[in-house]
């Protein structure tokens, strides 16, 4: 079923891959992005692109009405864990208050389907791994708390709609899917879309920049964790698979699926050292590594129990392979980023 969908943050890394898949699937896509970390070139030509902020309720309500939006996919948010430790108010304002403003606009305009980019960071340091969705949520950094608060708000709004406790405005249910992302990485298989976040901090991106000579090397943030080799373990998911999970969630809500919180990972973890070795292997380039102190806000290990998402959504990941994740990230870093920069550079007068 083709829907009219607002994609906030659709010029960013995961948002642009999702917008591209939505357009390819025949949906009408409106991208709202303030270009904090997004790029115009990343937005598919067939999407309507609007520059603006999710917290601008007047603008958002107008977009929802003018484009007869039926569903919102909300990516726009800050994602850097250490920055959230240093500047929590930035995260609460944008990630939490901004999300509330967007939800309020949905309430005002009767948009009843909402897909939210949540995070594995809501678990904090899980007692049991892999982490199931019903594991206790105890985030250990402001980023995780900003996402968890948004999940709570979504839950409360959905319940209030079911109870009919909202003044009778003639509107029905509000249903959502919160996708708890684990560690997303990689680039499109055709090499035309990938992560272009300025001053990226994520491991695979940083490692690819290093093998491409864009930085000196990689510092491993701690090798004294209680893990397989002392470095932190994460569940890395390919960006194309993560994007397709959003389309599956949209299809699910479109046929009256009930609200759900779902892990988005593959269910197996790799250590920082294993990832760096993989980047060395796919690039064939040695990667200088320094061992540094632990980074604030880092859980030792985070791996998804991915059972539930397969039960609920019609979703089959296609790129469940660390080598594919690292190879596509590397190829994008080496070739794709450069061709984008060239295409964007103002021609010499
Ligand atoms: N790391 C390094 N050196 C670097 C960069 C990262 O050693 O230069 C390590 C980190 O300490 C961590 C691991 O690599 O142990 C992964 O770090 P990332 O910065 O790539 O990602 P995070 O795990 O901090 O966070 C990401 C997302 C969150 C999500 C989380 C879930 O940004 O949204 O994964 O695992 F919640």
Image: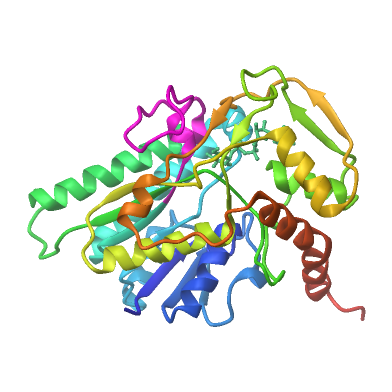
Q: Quadrant of ligand 1?
A: top right
Q: Nearer the viewer, residue 134 or 322?
A: 322
- Where is residue 99? Give x, y as percent: 39, 49
Q: Position of residue 104 (x, y in %)?
A: 29, 54
Relative to residue 343, is residue 93 depicted above or below? above
Question: In this rendering, is residue 1 above or below 186?
Answer: below
Colour theme = rainbow
Q: Residue at x 85, y 46 (%)?
A: 210
For residue 182, above or below residue 23: above
- Foreground residue among 63 and 77: 77
Image quadrant occupied by the C terminus: bottom right
Of helix, strand and loop, which mostly describes the magenta segment? loop
Q: Is residue 213 left or right of residue 234?
A: right
The reply, left or right, for residue 2 in relation to residue 146 is left
Q: Which residues are magenta?
A: 117-144
Looking at the image, can residue 9 be seen? Answer: no
Q: Name above or below for residue 33 compared with residue 199.
A: below
| 327 horizontally vs 216: left or right | left
Residue 78 visible in image? yes
Quarter of the image for the N terminus: give it.
bottom left
What residue is rendered at 46% in x and 33% in y? 130
Residue 13, position in %: x, y?
61, 58
Q: Residue at x 87, y 38 (%)?
A: 217
Asked if residue 298 lies in the magenta stretch, the reply is: no
Q: Is residue 346 left or right of residue 106?
A: right
* Quadrant housing residue 274: top right
Along the line of sight, the residue nearer the viewer: 210 or 226: 226
Residue 123 position in % (x across, y down): 43, 31
């Amino acid at each position: 079923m083709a829907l009219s969908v607002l994609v906030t943050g659709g010029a960013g890394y995961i948002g642009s891959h999702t917008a591209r898949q939505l357009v390819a699937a025949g949906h009408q896509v409106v991208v709202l992005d303030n270009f904090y970390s997004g790029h115009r070139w990343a937005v598919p030509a067939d999407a309507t692109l609007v520059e603006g902020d999710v917290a601008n309720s007047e603008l958002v309500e107008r977009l929802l009405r003018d484009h007869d939006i039926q569903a919102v996919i909300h990516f726009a948010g800050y994602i850097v864990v250490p920055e959230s430790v240093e500047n929590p108010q930035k995260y609460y304002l944008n990630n939490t208050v901004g999300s509330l403003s967007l939800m309020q606009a949905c309430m005002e305009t009767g948009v009843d389907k909402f897909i939210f980019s949540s995070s594995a960071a809501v678990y904090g340091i899980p007692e049991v791994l892999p982490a199931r969705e019903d594991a206790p949520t105890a985030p250990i950094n402001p980023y995780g708390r900003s996402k968890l608060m948004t999940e709570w708000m979504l839950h409360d709004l959905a319940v209030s709609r079911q109870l009919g406790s909202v003044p009778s405005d003639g509107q029905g249910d509000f249903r959502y899917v919160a996708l708890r992302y684990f560690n997303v990485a990689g680039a499109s298989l055709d090499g035309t879309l990938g992560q272009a976040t300025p001053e990226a901090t994520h491991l695979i991106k940083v490692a690819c920049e290093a093998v491409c000579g864009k930085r000196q090397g990689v510092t491993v943030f701690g090798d004294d964790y209680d893990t397989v080799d002392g470095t932190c373990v994460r569940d890395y998911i390919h960006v194309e698979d993560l994007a397709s999970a959003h389309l599956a969630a949209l299809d699910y809500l479109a046929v009256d699926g009930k609200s759900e919180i779902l892990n988005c990972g593959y269910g197996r973890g790799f250590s920082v050292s294993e990832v760096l070795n993989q980047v060395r292997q796919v690039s064939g380039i040695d990667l200088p590594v320094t061992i540094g102190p632990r980074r604030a806000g880092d859980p030792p290990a985070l791996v998804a129990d991915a059972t539930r998402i397969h039960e609920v959504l019609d979703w089959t990941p296609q790129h469940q392979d660390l080598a594919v994740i690292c190879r596509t990230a590397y190829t994008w870093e080496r070739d794709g980023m450069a061709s984008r920069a060239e295409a964007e550079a103002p021609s010499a007068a």
